Amino acid sequence: MRNDFLWAVALLALPALAAERKFDFSELHENQTPPGFRSTVTGKGKPGDWRIVLDEVPSLLPPLSPQAPVVAKRPVLAQLAQDPTDEHFPLLIFEDETFDDFTLTTRFKTVKGVKEQMAGIAFRIQDETNYYVVRASSLGNTFRFYKVVNGERGTLIGPETPIPSGVWHELTIECKGTQIHCLLDGKELIPVLTDSAFARGKIGFWTKSDAVSYFADTRIVYTPREPPMQTIVHDVAKTYPRLLDLEVYVPSKDRQSARRVASKSGKEMDRAADKAAHDVISRGVTYYGKGKKSVEVTMPLRDRNGDLVAAARVIMQTFFGETEQTALARAMPIVKDIEGRIQLIHDPLQ
């Protein structure tokens, strides 16, 4: 049994819900590099030196009283390397998630730099040489968006505006389909952008040349993509509109239990499998059941190597005189359709 494929299907079959992710550096130690990130570089030179430092950061909440402190020293993310190379863009990429539509808000502060004092966010990152970026420059007093394609920087879009160094600012990026909104300190200084080069990708913190910059209070609200297995079930259900229901079950890692991970309705995900579905997965058998108005067939699902990876339950309206053989004959093309679609998923984790 190919557990790698099985677990890819199982993990991706969770329902898609609105999600929020916060990068909280408060529990990290000083000089620590945040886990889950990869330090790299676009252009020339070595990757940046990304570490946690302590800095005074204004509270996001209004003070409870006039005597309450308005700033507090706490851990923030810093890029500390000071490589003066011109075409040198340190990136710290978050590796654990790929984002489609999202709204990202972060606070940043440019601290120092002789050649550059820049801070930005790279997003919809495909790799180090293909992504979008929005960045602020305190030396140039510019707020700009541009696209990097195969390592080549595209047209810079955005205005000149004062961005004082040593001061915390707020950067907001909103992506919805091909539309991109970029805000600095709550103001949409760049006209709404439309670009279809990158539909999804990772996000990363970005600086340039010898810029030392800090980041804090990064928050992403996003819509996870529908998992492939649920998409497959939805598509198959459209092909067979008279189906009453269509369900897929996968086993746990130890194969001692199984759970429902996709259905025509998209409801009651993660429900424990009944004995029939569990037996289909564990023994490779087929189950048949008939009621007054419906008939259901539960059959094995196999991957491209013929390994059993899940169970599919097909629930159909029955008719007078229907037999087990006719029910199996009706269910078989549906199950084969699901298997054919599963076998087209070359990389289920993307």
Image (cartoon, rainbow, N blue to C red):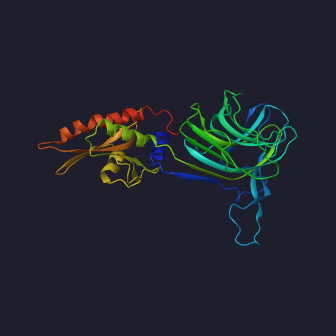
Where's residue 128, x and y in %? 68, 33
- The N terminus appears in which quarter of the rendering? top left
Where's residue 221, x and y in %? 57, 50
Which residue is depicted at the point 86% across and 37% down? 115
Taking 104 as reference, is 108 left or right? right
Q: Quadrant of residue 29?
A: bottom right
Q: Please name whichever residue, 269 or 71, is drawn nearer the observer in this view of the structure.
A: 71
Q: How many numbered marks have been drawn onto this rendered protein structure?
A: 0
Which residue is depicted at the point 21% across and 45% down? 317
Taking 222 as reference, is 166 left or right? right
Taking 300 as reference, is 157 left or right? right
Q: Is residue 244 visible?
A: yes
Which residue is depicted at the point 11% across and 42% down? 321
Where's residue 258, x and y in %? 39, 51
Q: Please name whichever residue, 317 or 33, is drawn nearer the observer in this view of the structure.
A: 317
| In the rendered image, the vertical position of residue 236 relative to residue 55, given as above or below | above
Which residue is depicted at the point 84% across and 41% down? 82
Q: Please name whichever residue, 34 or 72, is drawn nearer the observer in this view of the structure.
A: 72
Where's residue 210, x and y in %? 83, 39
Q: Is residue 98 visible?
A: no
Residue positioned most to the right? 114
